[in-house]
Amino acid sequence: MSSELIINSSRDKSRIGLLKDKKLVEFHQESDETKFNVGDIYVGKVKKINKSLNAAFIDIGFEKDAFLHYLDLGPQFLSLKTFVKKLRGKGKNTPYESFKRLEDINKFGKINEVLTKGDELLIQIVKEPISTKGPRVTTELSLAGRFLILVSFSDAINISKKITNREERVRMINLIKSIKPKNFGVIVRTVAENKSVSELDKDLKSLISSWKEGIKKIKKAKVGEKVLGEENRTTSLLRDILNSSFDNIIIDEKKLFTEVKEYVKKYEPKKEKIVKFYSSPAPIFEVYGIEKQLQDLFGETVPISNGGYVIIQHTEALHAIDVNSGKTSKVSNQEEAALKVNLDAADTIARQLRLRDIGGIIVIDFIDLKKISNKRKLYEAMKKAMEDDRSKHTILPLSKFCLMQITRQRVRQELKMSKEDAELDQDGTEAADMIEKKIEHLFVKQNEKQLTLVVHPYLYSYFTIGVLSRQYKWFIKHRRWVKIEKDNNIGIKDYVFLDSNRQIIQTKK
């Protein structure tokens, strides 16, 4: 299976599409205004203690206070609290490696025993602000690298469970022991398997350097100020998913291209050549078919093969997905037909969950199956379809009524169409209606024999997508072909009509 990462970067926004065999399976979007990302570390101040929840609400500069539960403090919370207090005090600072760790907190303790209103802490975002809720945070701080995860105030060494070779696990433990400084714990990631000492050491030193840079900022940092930030969405995505199956990483912005190339060169030098700069004037997402695929992303109804479709609806409590057979051909064996539609739907649903980053409780109403063996097949198919989903999830077997329940970790806001996108769509539709009226006028009233239409790439896609595109329908209606050209410099509502001699005969600019 081939993998491609397509990155469209502009001055204030980046869009990232992950393709598997040309099919869009993940979509990410970030802007310069994006704050409180998962992994970011802030200076926070205890605003309120809630004994009934055994939690505290922390001011980190967001309109809603962050939520910190006692279980998210980490065993070495007192060490972190004391260290931060010393750093932000007037006395002489103790170097991190020389800091003497305190005893672990009581696992079953109460939040008011270790925290008071006004305490200043270092906290890390584990769940971004969603809906009306503020971020969820932890004081068990960690920094993720390509091969290792650095854990503060710990000496533990943990190896990924996916590294199953006993000799390799022993080698890793002995290796990390030899290079790890005091007061740092290390989690060895799956991709570190069979990596050399020099590669792991380089990654570890890079993480320690980042930690020290963050420590320097703590003394003068204000409450709500970020002291350590997660990498941009592009490099953090590469860190987690880059593997031998990647064929291409294509970027249309020079600075980001250079950064990604350096990152890949540093950690996967053999894959450096797959990082390519896209210089064509044609929009990169259109060329690689992503814009077309994104049209399904925001729709309530999503088609599947065999004429079926799924309907995705959202409530405050859960996400409901209904599977329908649609215009599937009539067959004698309804059970087998239902199974086929359900299996196709499972792939589509798994893809949609990743694309939209849907989290929480998901209930799927599949087409009724009577045979237990078929229900088992569907259950196994859904598990297989979600194998590549990096979000933690649990899939339950089908109920008596052919309902399937899925819980999927939600750490970010579900991807939805923005106000700007909605306005763009509205503007585009209005412009499209106007253009169709102009074509009617030019062919019928002015008897033009040949037309060339120049429009924004958005409208170009709108008119040309599909076998029975609007462009083709014009040909059927008027028996004359309208050639369409796209121009990035033209407004969404603007257009230019050219005659056979490429002379302007109608324009709106």
Image (tube, helix red, strand yellow):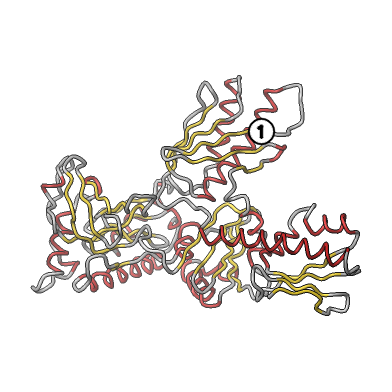
Q: Percent x, y for residue 102?
A: 12, 55
What residue do we see at 41% from left, 37% from top? 317
Residue 414 is left or right of residue 366, and the answer is left
Which one is nearer the viewer's eye here, 117 or 193?
Answer: 117
Asked which quadrant contains residue 452, the reply is bottom right
- Residue projecting furthest to the left: 91
Question: Where's residue 16, x and y in %?
Answer: 54, 62
The residue depicted at 55 percent of the width and 40 percent of the height is 312
The local crowd at label 1, few if under 14, some if 14 to 19, many if 20 or more residues have their Cα within 10 Å, is: many
**Residue ID at (78%, 65%):** 438
Q: Amino acid at mark 1?
A: Val
Q: Is residue 424 left or right of residue 405?
A: right
The quarter holding residue 229 reads bottom left
User: Looking at the rendering, which quadrant does residue 91 occupy?
Assistant: bottom left
Left/right of residue 419 with respect to residue 442 in the rendered view: left
Image label count: 1
Foreground of the two, 458 or 218: 458
- Image side of residue 260 versus residue 465, left or right: left
| Label 1: which secondary element | helix
Would you place residue 376 above or below residue 290 in this image? above
Name the foreground residue: 295 vs 39.
Answer: 295
User: Where does the C terminus fall, quadrant-wise?
Assistant: bottom right
Label 1 sits on residue: 341
Along the viewing direction, whichever of 395 and 159 lies nearer the viewer: 395
Note whether 19 is above or below 501 in the view shown.
above
Give the x, y percent position of residue 373: 59, 23
Residue 274 appears at what percent x and percent y?
60, 68
